[in-house]
Image (tube, rainbow, N blue to C red):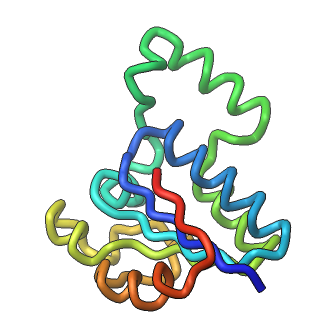
Amino acid sequence: MKKLAVIVTRGAYNNLLQACELVRLAAASGTQVSVLFRDEAAARLTNEKIKEIPFSEAYRGRESRTREILRERKRHDLPAILREIKEKGDVKFCVCRDSLAYFEIAVEQLIPELDEVQPAEAFWKESVAMSDHVLTF
């Protein structure tokens, strides 16, 4: 089985969605995928912040229309997207322990769709070093 490691650091909604879409495609094709959310991306994955993730600068002035399009396509609910991905393939979503410390986020504040909190070093050893491909977002 092919293995893919994905590291997501940027926290804009369009970046998180793009990463999730590629993970979904990889998982659907039978690839085992491990994802590490760290830095700004990790800070967005709390129950409070997940509801209002901003878009990157490129979407300035188009945020409302873009959210409308995403709602129509059922791509507006990131936790639902994560659940859908996990239902369709062998995917593990992790969040970086160090990033949580930097942003003073308690594990209890995270969305339940995340599977594990681990140091970046552990993700490197368990996923990156063992993968056929590594993508970063």
Nearest to the observer: residue 97 or residue 113? 97
Nearest to the observer: residue 126 or residue 76? 126
From the viewer's perspective, tell me whether residue 135 is left or right of residue 26.
left
Tell me where residue 112 appears, x and y as whole percent. 51, 73
Furthest residue in direction front, as rendered: 132
- Residue drawn at (51%, 19%), measured in percent from left and top? 63
- Residue drawn at (41%, 64%), measured in percent from left and top? 37
Tell me where residue 19 appears, x and y as whole percent. 57, 52
Reply above or below: 102 against 119: above
- Residue drawn at (62%, 76%), measured in percent from left and top? 132
- Residue drawn at (14%, 64%), measured in percent from left and top? 102
Reply above or below: 113 against 126: above
Instruction: Please tell me how many numbered marks the rendered image carries.
Output: 0
Quadrant for the N terminus in the image: bottom right
Tell me where residue 93 appears, x and y as whole percent. 53, 73
Tell me where residue 106 appears, x and y as whole percent. 25, 73
Nearest to the observer: residue 41 or residue 112? 41
Reply above or below: 132 against 56: below
The quadrant in which residue 124 appears is bottom left
